[in-house]
Image (spheres, helix red, strand yellow):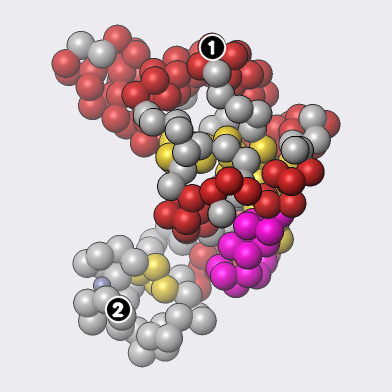
Amino acid sequence: MAEHVPQLIILMGPPGSGKGTQAETLRQETGMNYLATGDVVRELMARAATGDPIGAEMKERYDRGEPQPDDLILKAVKQKLTELSLKRGLIFDAFPLSLPQAEGLEKLREDLGLPEPVAVSIEISEEEVIKRITLRKFCPKDNSAYYPQSPTYESNTCAQCGAQLVKRDDDTAEVVSKRYREYVGRIKSLVEYYSEHGQLIVINGAQSVEAVGDEIRSKLSQYAQSRR
Ligand SMILES: [Zn+2]
């Protein structure tokens, strides 16, 4: 299916939308590369010790508890992009996260010869996210997540290793609600930006993992055909 999929995908969705799972499936199916801003920041900060200038600046800010500014995020993404193979396309996760970053991405595309992006926004209500996250349990050993529809949820055991499942302390309605609202506030202008450019695909996130995956595949394929 790789040739039917746009080659630069921006994946968006609040915590609890299943974005990470969908990114992983898409990556495996298409062979596209994957770039998550959080991973890039962590990786470059780890290189600070070996003299990476961007990593060093990020680490200083991180140690002072300051957020990373847009221009630094853009520099980090650019550096990482030059290290990745982009032959089979790229999935961005948590990038861009602001309008200046989206505009910066346009400049990066020019510099690096990247294709036009398409934003895939997995939408889901606050109520549904709260329901999902407050009910989920984790395996303390391998960190796999379990939801009420998972076969071993009721018996409270991990299907991989048999350990007793536990809930996380910060999976409360209050914490989830706060994170959800922060996400929506941050993403609003970006959704408008990609919508205005005719580069937005909206996915119903309140479905099963399989149904969300199917909707992403079919809408990406329609989108790719419509742009030919
Ligand atoms: Zn386990």
Q: Is residue 217 visible?
A: yes
Q: CA distance from mark 1 to mark 2?
A: 47 Å
* Residue 213, magenta (yes or no): yes
Mark 1 element type: helix
Q: Position of residue 108 (x, y in %)?
A: 55, 16
| Magenta residue span | 205-219
* Residue 91, magenta (yes or no): no
Q: Quadrant of ligand 1?
A: bottom left
Report the amino acid beneath label 2: Cys
Query: 22 left or right of 117?
Result: left
> Residue 158, which numbered label?
2
At x 63% / y 48%, what residue is drawn? Answer: 4
User: Which image quarter holds the N terminus?
Assistant: bottom right
At x 16% / y 16%, what residue is drawn? Answer: 50
At x 64% / y 24%, what residue is drawn? Answer: 102
Q: Which residue is label 1 attached to? A: 111
Q: Is residue 60 visible?
A: no
Q: Residue furthest right?
A: 196
| Residue nearest the observer in this picture, 176 or 21 | 21
| Residue nearest the observer in this picture, 217 or 10 | 217
Q: Residue furthest left?
A: 50
Report the amino acid beneath label 1: Asp
- The quarter of the displayed image where residue 52 is located: top left
Q: Is residue 104 above or below residue 201?
A: above
| Mark 1 Cα-neighbour bin, 10 Å: few <14, some 14–19, many ≥20 | few
